[in-house]
Amino acid sequence: MYLLAIESSCDETAAAVCADGKILSNFIATQKVHEMYGGVVPELASRAHMQHIVPVVHQALEKAGCTPTQLDAVAFTQAPGLIGSLLVGAQFAKSLALSLNIPLIPVHHMQAHVLANLIPEERPSFPFLCLTVSGGHTQIVRCNSPLDMQVIGETIDDAAGEAFDKSAKLLGLPYPGGPLVDKYAREGNPERFSFPEPRIPGLNFSFSGLKTSILYFLRNAGTSLLYKEEFKATDEERTAFIQNNLADLCASIQHRIISILLNKMKKAVEETGIREVCIAGGVSANSGLRQALKETGDKLGWKTYIPPFEYCTDNAAMIAITGYYKYQAGQFADLSVAASARAEWE
Ligand code: KG4
Ligand code: ZN
């Protein structure tokens, strides 16, 4: 069974082909056009998807050694994401399904991030818990079977990826700052600066307080976590403080984000009794988080699973594996299906 999958929810145009659930190809065209704006510009993202989608699909089919007429189904990211971006992938998939007369499979982007854990040979057994951490979401998901998932905790404000990116911006680093914080943190002391951990009940997260405390701390050039007008440093003092302490700042910020995430995962394991634990989403590419999850798991007797880097950030292989399970369950859509910027879990 050959399936083509398309992902276009944000700023990556991606296509993948799988045969009977095995990934044969996985291509991504990253949009460089946003770098100079310090964030993704929706209008530019849609235009770039229009330019990239045909070449990316061609590459994916060619690498898989598959022609369009051999395809048995086409899957695409239906939601959530930037609506203009989603529409390009959805419209392409619908046209292909119509012209080839094959089933069309809509996929929820966040469910696909979780199921990226089922791509490698070594995969979690059900039920498992997944910490899904991306630029737009931070969730703890209980996964009972491939298509039966439940969000049991989530952020009440910023996502973990936003916490990385916004902190990086305060440090003067370009967008997206997450990978750069990761890079500088490797050389730094994570205990040098202590940023507060929020007290949020249950399994929910909050990251907005961390961002505010970093803002005040930098405003005061490292003299205080509290906002005090009289301590406000000059721009020169602040820039010098950041330059002289960049690695320690990155390591300390990353350390706090990771401790917020893992403390909630410990709570989730205690409450559910489930010890199969994985991570997913762009932030799961973070080297500190990957190492900390493994160490915590080894210490507490969890079995931990971490997808290869290429399946962590946005990609079409995760849409393909989800499409494969939906194909087996006969979960198809008709050609009236629409993309949606927001989406509840099914
Ligand atoms: O899943 P993803 O590729 O796109 C969304 O669906 O949001 O996640 C993107 C997020 C960005 O916030 C980016 O800064 C973050 O993942 N990210 C990282 C790393 N690589 C990507 N954050 C920290 N460390 C990394 N190595
Ligand atoms: Zn994503």
Image (spheres, rainbow, N blue to C red):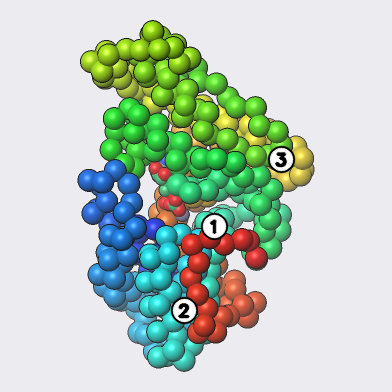
> Cβ–Cβ below 8 Å for labels 3 and 2?
no
Q: Which residue is mark 3?
A: 269
Q: Secondary structure at mark 2?
A: strand
Mark 1 residue CB less than 8 A from any atom of ligand 2? yes
The residue lying toward the viewer, choosing from 254 and 42, is: 42
Instruction: Label 3, secondary structure: give it.
Output: helix
Type of amino acid under label 3: Val
Q: Which mark is residue 110?
A: 1
Residue 326: x, y in percent? 59, 73
Tell me where residue 74 appears, x and y as whole percent: 46, 79
Which residue is pictured at 53% across the width and 34% down the height? 207
**Which of the two labelled residues, at mark 2 and mark 1, occupies the earlier sequence position?**
2
Tell me which amino acid carries mark 1: Met
Side (left or right) of 107 relative to 193: right
Residue 196 horizontal/vertical position (percent): 55, 21
Using the image, determine if residue 241 lies above or below residue 177. Answer: above
Residue positioned 38% across, 78% down in the render: 92
- Looking at the image, can residue 52 be seen? no
Q: Out of 316 and 234, give the one closest to the viewer.
A: 234
Task: Quote the CA–CA distance across marks 2 and 1.
Answer: 18 Å
Cα–Cα gap, marks 3 and 2: 36 Å
Q: Quadrant of residue 327?
A: bottom right
The crowding category of the residue bearing disc 2, from other C-alpha atoms within 10 Å (few below 14, some 14 to 19, many at least 20), is: many
Q: Name the residue carrying label 2.
A: 74
Label 3 beta carbon within 8 A of ligand 1? no
